[in-house]
Amino acid sequence: MKVLVVGNGGREHAIAWKLLQSPKVEKVFCIPGNGGTATLPGCQNISLQVDDFEGIANIASVQGVALVVVGPEVPLAGGIVDYLRYRHGHIAVFGPTREGAQIESSKLWAKELMHQAGVRTAKAIEFTELEAALNYLEQQPLPIVIKADGLAAGKGVTVAATLPEAVGAIQALFKQRFPKILIEEFIVGKEVSILALTDGSIVRPLLPACDHKRIGEGDTGENTGGMGVYAPAPWVTPDLMARIESEVLQPTVNALREQGITYQGMLYAGLMITETGEPLVLEFNCRFGDPETQAILPLLATPLADLLIACTGGNLAKFPVLEWLPGAAVCVVASAAGYPGKFPRGDEITGLQEAKEKGVQVFQAGTILNHQKKLLTDGGRVLSVTGLGVNLAEAIEQAYAGLAAINFPGMYYRRDIAGRIIPKEVDEVSEANNIPQFDLEPNLEPNLQIPIVPPQAESLPENAPQTDFT
Ligand code: AMP
Ligand code: GLY
């Protein structure tokens, strides 16, 4: 079977890599792919844009593709699934239609769906006028969350600690001509990403994963697309997973069906688990998470292609349980200097072979192979390194050992992913030599204390908008 993966991130590299482990998959095409998918055995990049639906449909047809997997939200929100189904009724396409993708592309639509489904979420009020929004804001406690209604290219969410910050965020969104904004209550708790496969009728959640969205260690600084992930999150107990499935995921899929939407793809719930243990939805995404995918898929034992095909065929019930490898995975993202702001491109990346020899899986994101077959940086999040272990402590150790072998000018990564403790002795010497420092509790599991501290008013940087990047 030939599969086509749309996208060019670490997520798509991981999806292509995992698909190629499925016995039925003979070849994967990646549109446009990156330096990692270019050199992945069995995978071929095709240089088209993700919004070139016609070009993608033509490739699928010429190459005899049986399954298309769409990575990013933009083509999903633009209706790529509808288009491919219209052009090739026989092709299985993993991902929701344009209507279903509204769960991510319109926060307001998602809120209404959640109300219909009886799914608990943060209280939010919609505004179309600046003045009304500012009047309402004045009556609200701080911190407060300001959200654009719509895909916002990384500028959608501000967690405001002060009134001026909130006012600034609202003004900025209206200035950018977002027709609607939401003012949302601030929820305290621990965040977890639950990605669930669905065939439009039932759901199969994947392992719970915890992303680290802020750029800085100790969860400080600006939000990014995600700087690292660990999975499974040991604090998400089987009971909590069962509640998330029965109180969040299944009711959402049911409500979509009631609206006539058979949602066949990934339903990604960004959840806040409150102090009393209640799962509240912060957002839904209509796709695989990045970098969640790079930590979750290496642990998946059930062939991915079979699962995705089952979703598109409405027969996910064929898989009553998903099989997982034992142990844990930790994925650490290496970014270019300046990310999530401006960053350079075209710097040479070295040490990937040495990293692989440490046992890690390197999933590339913002990379490109030049004509001389040199691997160069070509994005903000350059690559992600996934370590595996019998427990999180081992997975952390492996991931950081792999990262230490890799280098490119200005390479940055957080040293505290998965609660890794950064000892005071991490000084200029070890930093200069790129030596990872370990000072982990000998037995991190099962009572791992992950310091996931909800942003407190005083810990939020002044004038630093908290953005959502994907
Ligand atoms: P979103 O894109 O909606 O996931 O928001 C980006 C980030 O902002 C989330 O990962 C949270 O850390 C934070 N956030 C969003 N909504 C809230 C909320 N209602 N309360 C607290 N934090 C939030
Ligand atoms: N890691 C966050 C996202 O994929 O949206």
Image (tube, rainbow, N blue to C red):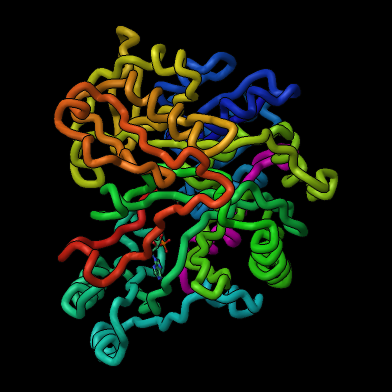
**Whether residue 200 can be seen here:** yes
Query: Considering depth in this image, is 66 or 246 the residue closer to the camera?
Result: 246
Question: Could you say where residue 344 lies in the image, as x and y percent from the top left?
Answer: 19, 32
Q: Residue at x 36, y 33 (%)?
A: 438
Query: Considering depth in this image, is 441 or 19 the residue closer to the camera?
Result: 441
Answer above or below: position of 198 versus 139. Answer: above
Query: Considering depth in this image, is 278 or 370 the residue closer to the camera?
Result: 278
Which image quadrant is residue 68 in?
top right
Answer above or below: position of 409 versus 210. Answer: above
Answer above or below: position of 233 versus 384. Answer: below
Q: Give the residues in magenta.
A: 87-109
* Residue 454 on the magenta span: no
Answer above or below: position of 112 versus 315. Answer: below
Which image quadrant is residue 445 in?
top right
Q: Which residue is drawn at 25% across and 24% down?
A: 434
**Whether residue 315 can be seen here:** no
In the displayed image of the protein, which residue is found farthest to the right?
Answer: 318
Image quarter (top left, top right, bottom left or bottom right) of the N terminus: top right
Q: Which residue is drawn at 20% across and 29% down?
A: 431
Question: Could you say where residue 447 lies in the image, as x and y percent from the top left?
Answer: 54, 52
Q: In this view, does 219 lie to the left or right of 450?
A: left
Question: Could you say where residue 86 lies in the image, as x and y percent from the top left?
Answer: 66, 46
Q: Residue at x 31, y 58 (%)?
A: 467
Question: Could you say where residue 336 lies in the image, as x and y percent from the top left?
Answer: 25, 34
In the displayed image of the protein, which residue is found farthest to the front?
Answer: 442
Q: Is residue 193 left or right of residue 63?
A: left
How many marks the image carries: the answer is: 0
* Residue 94 on the magenta span: yes
Which image quadrant is residue 452 in?
bottom left
